[in-house]
Image (spheres, grey):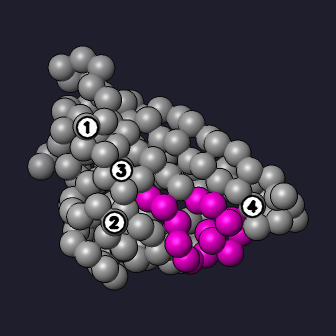
């Protein structure tokens, strides 16, 4: 069995957890305009923008390289959490399991955190741990903050 693990981090954000959650839950089509230095495109492969189980294809840049990621969306409205379950793409060449959970938690009237949990399992032990992808998804949440506040 190849190495597996879980990374967890928190990103401080401003405003309302509901607004941030809405952006990540159902407004992914706005990502290229908001954080185009990270996300160059998002398309629906199956389902609707805001539907549980929708499959989306992301074109993004990680570590200066263009990559593609196909994911199935899982939505948890009660906990304001969205899970991106990896299906195909560059990251899946290295990993058997790649699930990223973004949960938005209101800490005070003006402050929230985005708790990011990444669950992963390598294809084999020769592959590096995906710490670069954790850094990437953390920067997505942080960089989206200003755009959500202006919305």
User: Which residue bears the numbered disc 4?
Assistant: 122
- Which is closer to the viewer, label 2 or label 4? 2
Indicate which disc, 4 or 3, sits on the residue closer to the N terminus.
3
Residue contact at pointers 1 and 2, CB within 8 angstroms = no
Q: Is residue 149 above or below residue 25?
A: above
Q: Is residue 149 above or below residue 147?
A: above
Which element type, helix, strand or loop, lies under badge 2? loop
Residue name at image x 21 percent, y 62 percent: 50
Q: Quadrant of the N terminus?
A: bottom right
The local crowd at label 2, few if under 14, some if 14 to 19, many if 20 or more residues have their Cα within 10 Å, is some
Would you say 63 lies left or right of 42 here?
Answer: right
The local crowd at label 1, few if under 14, some if 14 to 19, many if 20 or more residues have their Cα within 10 Å, is few
User: Which residue bears the numbered disc 3?
Assistant: 82
Would you say 54 lies left or right of 102 here?
Answer: left
User: Which residue bears the numbered disc 2?
Assistant: 53
Q: Position of residue 87 (x, y in %)?
A: 53, 72
Query: Foreground: 60 or 51?
Result: 51
Indicate which disc, 1 or 2, sits on the residue closer to the N terminus.
2
Q: Position of residue 26 (x, y in %)?
A: 21, 59
Indicate which disc, 2 or 4, sits on the residue closer to the N terminus.
2
Residue name at image x 44 percent, y 35 percent: 115
Indicate which disc, 4 or 1, sits on the residue closer to the N terminus.
1
Magenta stretch bounds: 84-98
Residue name at image x 20 percent, y 32 percent: 15
User: Which residue bears the numbered disc 1?
Assistant: 78
């Amino acid at each position: 069995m190849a190495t597996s693990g879980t990374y967890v981090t928190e990103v401080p954000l401003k405003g309302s957890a509901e607004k941030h959650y809405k952006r990540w839950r159902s407004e992914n089509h706005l990502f290229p305009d908001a954080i185009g230095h990270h996300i160059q495109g998002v398309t629906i492969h199956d389902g609707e923008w805001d539907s549980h189980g929708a499959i989306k294809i992301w074109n993004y840049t990680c570590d200066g390289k263009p990559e593609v990621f196909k994911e199935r969306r899982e939505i948890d409205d009660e906990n304001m959490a969205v899970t991106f379950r990896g299906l195909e793409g560059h990251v899946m060449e290295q990993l058997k399991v790649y699930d990223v959970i973004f949960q938005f938690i209101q800490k005070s009237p003006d402050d929230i955190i985005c708790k990011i949990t990444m669950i992963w399992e390598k294809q084999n032990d020769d592959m590096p741990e995906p710490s670069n992808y954790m850094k990437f998804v953390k920067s997505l949440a942080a960089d989206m903050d200003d755009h959500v506040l202006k919305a």
